[in-house]
Image: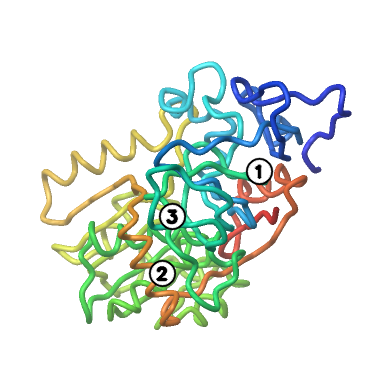
């Protein structure tokens, strides 16, 4: 099902964004928390960049599970950040790539016509998005705008987990669950770029994909429970969290690092209960249990741009959807079986 279509007379503008005679754009808009069917295709005012902002003509935007959580307002804890009764920003989406259309008076590093990619907290599922200049970097040569849009949040999450939280070093044994997903597909490649011996866990249909990403070993979870094997790992990035913490810890070395990263949990507090449990357990073991929240960092985006340029990292795109079918894209992501990233073309 695509975004609900409305006649011109019924179209509404994002609250606070409209003004008489303003130029408009197409956008996926939500006026309330709810399932993907809550999205509407609307004409809204093109935002004006502030002094340190860049107006980007969006070529493509990717979506990930976090976008779904924000859209539905569940777990309810997300509403403390994104709006108690309704989304603070009416346009969903975080990642984007496109062409600079205009810049604020304080922006000197970018100019109209530059191809850029990055992230915005004000919504990206639209023809234009206003983005702080520090959230954008140039698209690497020979990388398509669609591929670039697939990178920011998921790849930064993988990079920060492996480099900053786990401090992955050459020769270490790294296991990645959900290795064919958005974060997982980047994590396998980044861990290999750091010189690790990488094991990916995925379903039968994704074994060849994960192997093609550079994994040294692939575990098909439909046939083998990785928590019951004899192999031990220095680092486990658990993007699925289908197994109890105690079971996963069995295959972690005595001083290894476990990073829980599924983002799922109960309808009220989501993964917070599991995060607290991991923090408490860390005080009673030499193993390091380190749930974390990734942050948008321009320097990390520049690092990823280098990895993309050298071919050490290549985005995996599962499906693409046009902007008017953004609801279908988010519904597909919510099912939890994506191979790499889902991209919306604008």
Picture coordinates of residue 69 (x, y %)?
A: 53, 37
Give the distance between the C-alpha atoms of the residues marked 3 and 2, in whole angstroms: 11 Å
Q: Distance between the residues labelled 2 and 1?
A: 24 Å
Residue carrying label 1: 126
Q: How crowded is mark 2: few (under 14 residues within 10 Å), some or many (20 or more)?
A: many
Q: Residues within 10 Å of mark 1 (few under 14, many from 20)?
A: many
Nearest to N terminus: mark 3 or mark 1: 1
What is the tally of numbered marks visible in this picture? 3
> Along the line of sight, which residue is nearer the eye, 125 or 274?
125
Q: What element carries label 1?
A: loop
Q: Is residue 97 visible?
A: no
> Can you give x and y, in whole percent of width and height, for residue 171 in the image?
22, 81
Q: Mark 3 points at which residue?
A: 136
Q: Residue 305 carries which label?
A: 2
Which badge, 2 or 1, is on the more N-terminal residue? 1
Does residue 68 appear in this view?
yes
Res 270 label: none
Rendered location of residue 200, percent (x, y): 43, 72
Image spot of residue 48 (x, y percent) = 55, 35
Task: Give whichever of discs 3 and 2 has the lower sequence position.
Answer: 3
Q: Find the distance from the CA under tag 3 to the CA under tag 1.
A: 17 Å
299 to the left or right of 67: left
Residue in the picture at 67% in, 50% down: 332
- Asked whether 61 or 290 is in front, the reply is 61
Q: In this view, does 233 lie to the left or right of 128?
A: left
The reply to whether dot 3 and dot 2 touch (C-beta < 8 Å) is no
């Amino acid at each position: 099902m695509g975004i609900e279509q409305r006649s011109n007379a019924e179209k509404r503008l994002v609250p606070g964004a409209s003004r008489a005679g303003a130029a408009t754009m197409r956008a996926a808009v939500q006026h309330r928390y709810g399932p993907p069917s809550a999205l509407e295709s609307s004409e809204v005012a093109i935002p004006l960049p502030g002094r340190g902002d860049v107006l980007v003509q969006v070529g493509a935007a990717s979506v990930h599970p976090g976008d779904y959580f924000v859209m539905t307002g569940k777990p309810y804890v997300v509403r403390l950040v994104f709006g108690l009764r309704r989304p603070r920003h009416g346009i969903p989406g975080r990642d984007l790539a496109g062409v600079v259309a205009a810049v604020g008076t304080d922006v000197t590093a970018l100019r109209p016509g530059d191809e850029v990619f990055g992230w915005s907290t004000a919504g990206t599922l639209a023809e234009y998005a206003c983005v702080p200049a520090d959230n954008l970097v140039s698209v690497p040569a020979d990388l398509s705008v669609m591929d670039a849009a697939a990178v920011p949040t998921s790849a930064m999450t993988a990079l920060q987990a492996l480099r900053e939280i786990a401090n992955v070093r050459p020769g270490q044994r790294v296991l990645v669950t959900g290795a064919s997903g958005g974060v997982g597909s980047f994590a396998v490649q980044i861990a290999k770029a750091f010189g690790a011996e990488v094991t990916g866990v995925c379903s039968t249909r994704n074994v060849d994909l994960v192997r093609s990403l550079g994994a040294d070993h692939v575990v098909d979870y439909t046939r083998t429970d990785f928590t019951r094997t004899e192999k031990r790992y220095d680092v486990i990035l658990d993007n699925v969290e289908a197994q109890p913490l105690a079971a996963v810890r069995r295959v972690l070395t005595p001083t290894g690092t476990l990073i829980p990263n599924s983002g799922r949990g109960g309808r009220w507090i989501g993964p917070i209960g599991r995060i607290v449990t991991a923090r408490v357990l860390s005080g009673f073991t030499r193993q390091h249990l380190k749930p974390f929240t990734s942050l948008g960092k321009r320097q990390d985006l520049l690092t990823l741009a280098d990895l993309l340029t050298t071919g050490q990292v290549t985005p995996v795109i599962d499906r693409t959807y046009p902007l008017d079918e953004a609801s279908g894209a988010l519904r597909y992501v919510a099912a939890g079986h994506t191979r790499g990233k889902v991209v919306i073309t604008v």
